[in-house]
Amino acid sequence: MKITKIAAVFLVMAFSGKMMAQETEKQLLIKDADDKFPIADALVKYNQGNSHTHTGTDGTFAIPVKSLPDTLVISRQGYDEVNG
């Protein structure tokens, strides 16, 4: 089975800067690193805590941003897991 890398183009945008006490939600996009097509049904979760979601058919997802620092973990069968 060929393992492909996920392009985590959103990580710098999602987690640059400091967050205040209010909760915010970010909507971001996951793409295949090689062909740049969206990746559907990827699991996106925080390394700490229990918030998680899945990407839609267009590769987008929305997840609440509660406190930093934390790391998003992105996984999908056939792809390398991404932490960032």
Image (cartoon, grey):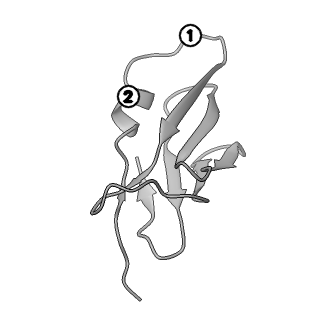
Observer-nearest of 51 and 59 = 59
Residue 63 location, x and y as percent? 63, 35
Q: Which mark is residue 13?
A: 2
Observer-nearest of 56 and 21 = 56
Which amino acid lies under the numbered mark 1 shown in the image of this protein? Met
Residue 21 location, x and y as percent? 63, 11
33 w.r.t. 2: above or below: above
Badge 1 vs badge 2, beta-carbon distance below 8 Å: no
80 w.r.t. 73: above or below: below
Q: Image quadrant of residue 20?
A: top right
Q: Label 1 neighbourhood size at 10 Å, few (<14), some (14-19), many (20+)?
A: few
Q: Residue 32 carries which label?
A: none
SS for callout 1: loop
**What residue do we see at 36% from left, 84% from top?**
2
The residue at the far bottom in this view is: 1
Q: Label 2 neighbourhood size at 10 Å, few (<14), some (14-19), many (20+)?
A: few
SS for callout 2: helix
**What residue do we see at 32% from left, 55% from top?**
36
Q: How far apart are marks 1 and 2 (CA)?
A: 16 Å
The residue at the far right in this view is: 50
Judged left or right of residue 45, residue 30 is left
Residue 81 location, x and y as percent? 45, 64
Foreground: disc 1 or disc 2: 2
Q: Which mark is residue 20?
A: 1
Which amino acid lies under the numbered mark 2 shown in the image of this protein? Met
64 w.r.t. 81: above or below: above
Q: Image quadrant of residue 17?
A: top left
**What residue do we see at 49% from left, 58% from top?**
39
Q: In which quarter of the image is the N terminus?
A: bottom left
Mark 1 vs 2, N-terminal side? 2
Residue 23 location, x and y as percent? 66, 18
2 w.r.t. 49: above or below: below
